Amino acid sequence: MATAALAQVQSVLDHYSSLADAFIALEAVLLVVFNVERINLFQRRKYQQDLISPFTTKPFFQRTTLPISPQSIVGYVALSQQALIIPDPFDTQALHAIHPSLQLTGQLNEKFDGQSPHTTSNILCIPIMHAGVLLGVVQLVNKANAFGDDDLTLGTNIAQMLAQRFTYELGGTQRPLDTLVHRKCITNDALDALLMEPGLNDNPKLLLQKLISEHRIEPNLIGQSLSIHYQVPYISYDPERYHVYANANRLNESYLKHHLIAIIANNNDKPIILMAQPNNASIILEIERALNIASYDIAVGLATDILQFLGESDSHSCPAEMDEILDEISMSADDLDDPIEELSDEAPAVVRLVSRILHDATRLTASDIHIDPQKSAPTRVRMRVDGICRDLNQIPASHHNAVIARIKIMANVNIAEKRIPQDGKLTFKHSDQLIEVRVATLPTIAGEGLVMRILASSGAMPIDQLNLSTENMLMLQGMARKPHGIMLVVGPTGSGKTTTLHAILGHLNTPDKKIWTIEDPVEITQPGLQQVQVNPKIGFTFANALRAFLRADPDIILIGEMRDKETAHAAVNASLTGHLVLSTLHTNSAPETITRLLDLGLDSINFSDACVGILAQRLIRSLCPKCKAPYQATPEERAFIHRQYGADMIAELNLKTDITLYKAVGCQQCDDIGYIGRTGVHELLTMTPTLRSLIYHSANVSELTKQAMCDGMRTLLQDGIKKMLYGITDIKQIQILGGVK
C-alpha cells in the first residue's frame, strides 16, 4: 500500500514542473491515500519567521499567515521540525503537555471549527525539510478513523519527496554556501575541497576565516548566501540598530559562545535569536523556554559578528589580518626610493595597524603595550599579559615614525616634539565599549619609544573574588566595619591595589553611606560613589581634594595614592575626625609601610591611633585549570616549603608525608603557556594595642613584623605557599615571589 502510494506521488511530481501546477493532482492522490477530508500545504515565506498557505483543499481555502512559533500546531511543527499526530486538537491539556503555548487557535480551519460538518477532529502535521532547512509544512486533517504510525511514516516520505523536487521553488539551496558558487565568488571544486578539510565543516568561525583570508570573499556575500540557504534574514554587527537583549543574561555565556548564538533586540526591543546555524530547532526551543519569550525573530549571522555581540571580538578580522597588514607595510617600505622619506601617519595600512594592535591587546587582556624602536632593526611590539611581556609583532623601521605619529595624534599630544617625554590619553571602541588608554612617549637613542597602559573599564570586582584566605577575609571585613580610621593597600605598580580598594568600597557601598573618591585617573566606576579626578595642572591635587571632601559630609573617603607628606597628613587627620579613609602606597610589605610613613614626618601617636590595618599584596600567575598536572613534591621542594613557611608555624598547614603540587603543562585554552590569569597573594596587618605600643616607641621593621605575625598576619610568601598547596599556582611562581630557591 505505502509503496504504491509513493509511486503515485512520484508520478505526479515527475509530470509537473511547479508545485502550483502539481498541487491539484497531488491533492487528489493524498486525499485517497490517507483517507482524509482536507490537505493544507504551508510554505515558508522568504526571509520571514512565518508560513503562508497558498495550497489548500477547496472549499476550505483561506489564505493564512502563521508565525513559526508554538502558539499553533503548524507553527510548533515548523519550529520543532518534528512531525505531530494530534488525536484531538480541542484537548487543551494534551496540547499543553506538548508545549505550554500550543493551541488550535490561529489554524487555517478556525472559521469552520464549531460549524458542522467541518469541525476538525484530528490532525497529522509533517515538516518539509531539505538540507536541514525548513521549507514548509504539510497538514492532513480529519482522517476517517485515526492517524497511526504508518500514516506518519508515509507522510514523512512524501514530505521528503516534495522537498527534493521543489527545493528551489520553496526556497533555499543545497548547501549554505552554494550562492557563492552561483555568484562566481568561488568555484564548486574549491568549495568542495574547503568543506572536506578535517574539522572545517563543523567550525563556522574557522570556515569564515578561510573564505575571507584565502578566497578574498566579502563577509556580506557570505552572510547573504547563508540567508538564502536558511531562509532567514542575515544580520551583521550593527550596534546602532541592534543591542543585546535585556534578559539574555539568563543564558550562560559559554553556552552561547559554544553554539555561536547571540540574543539581540532591535530598537523596538523585539528579541532576535541570531545564530550561525539557525536550523537547530532544539536549541531554539531551549532558548525560548529559558528566556520565556513567545514572540521573536530568527536570523543568521557570521561567527565573528555573533562573538562581537557577545563581547569577544570586534570585527571580521581573522588571525591572518595582522600578517596581511604587515605584508602591505613591508611592500610599501620596499617601494620607498629614499629610506629617510617619512610615510604619512594617515596611510591606511598604518591606521589599520594601530587599530589592530589596540584591539589585539584588549582581546588578550593585556595591561600594557610597548612599542620599542631598535637601531637598524624592525620596531618590536610587545604586550604585558598576566604580568609577563610577550612579543606580538615587528614593524618595519621605515614605518616606526608613522605609527608613533598616529598614536600621538589619537592621544592629542604634540607630534612635532620628539626630544622630551610626553603624556596623553586616547579612547577607542571595542565591542561597543569605550576603552581608555594612557600614552607615554620616551626619547631613546634608537628613536621615540612609546608605552600604552590600558585602563580597566569594568565595574568593581566583588570582594569574595579577591582570593583572600578565610582568615584574611574575616579580618579585612572587620576592618571595613570600623566607623573611622585609615586602611592602606600597598604594593608595587600593577599589583592590583586599585582593584582591591574598589572591591572593599563595593562591599561598603550601601545607601546609608556617602562615599567620595579622588583618583588619578578614575579607572573603575561604581554607582552611588562620588568620584573625582585630580588635575595637577590647575592645582587640584590629592591634598586639596581631600580638604574639599571634608566639607562635603563624607562617611568614607578613598584617596588614590598617598604620594607626598601633605596628602599623608591630611589623610590621617581626616581619619581622626570620624571618617574611614582608604588609600594606597608603594611599599614592599605591610610592616615596612609603617616605618615609611613615620619617615615622612607623620606623628607616631596619631598614625597608630588612626590606622586600622594595612594590606600588602602581589599578583602571581595562576595555573591553567584545564591542563595543570599533579605530581609529588621532591625532597628539595618539601625543604623549601618548610624553610620558607617557618618551622614554628609549619604545623598549621597539616602537611602529609607526600605533598601534592601542580605544574604548568600547556594546552589550547592557555595558548600552550600553562598559565591563565593572575591571582593575589596577601599580607594583612591588623592594628592591636601591642603593635601600637611598638609604634609609639619607634620599633624597627623586624620587631613590627614579629608582633604582627603573633597577631595573625601571614607574610606574602606564606600566603603564596598556601595557594600553591591548593593547586592555584606552582612553586616557580612562589620562588619568583620570594626571590629565593
Image: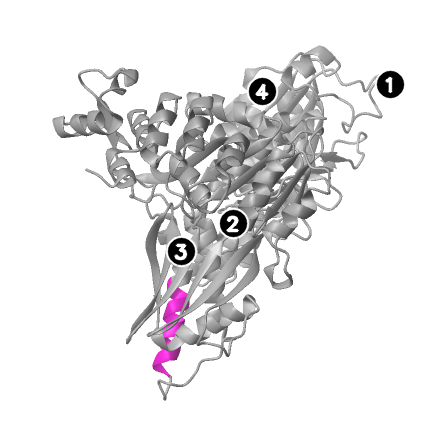
Q: Amino acid at mark 1?
A: Gln
| Location of residue 673 in the rendering, given as x and y in whole percent from the top left corner | 29, 43
Please rate how many residues cluster around mark 3, counting C-alpha atoms within 10 Å: few if below 14, some from 14 to 19, many from 20: few
N-term mark: 1 or 4: 1
Q: Amino acid at mark 4?
A: Asp
Q: Is residue 56 left or right of residue 131?
A: right
Q: In the picture, residue 299 is in which quadrant?
A: top right
Tell me, yes or no, whether the two marked residues, 1 and 2, touch with CB atoms within 8 Å: no
Residue corresponding to mark 1:
115
Residue corresponding to mark 4:
151
Q: Is residue 333 magenta?
A: yes
N-term mark: 3 or 4: 4
Q: Regarding mark 4 in the picture, which secondary structure is present there? A: helix
| Location of residue 39 in the rendering, given as x and y in whole percent from the top left corner | 70, 28
Tell me, what colour scheme is on the image? one colour
Q: Amino acid at mark 2?
A: Lys
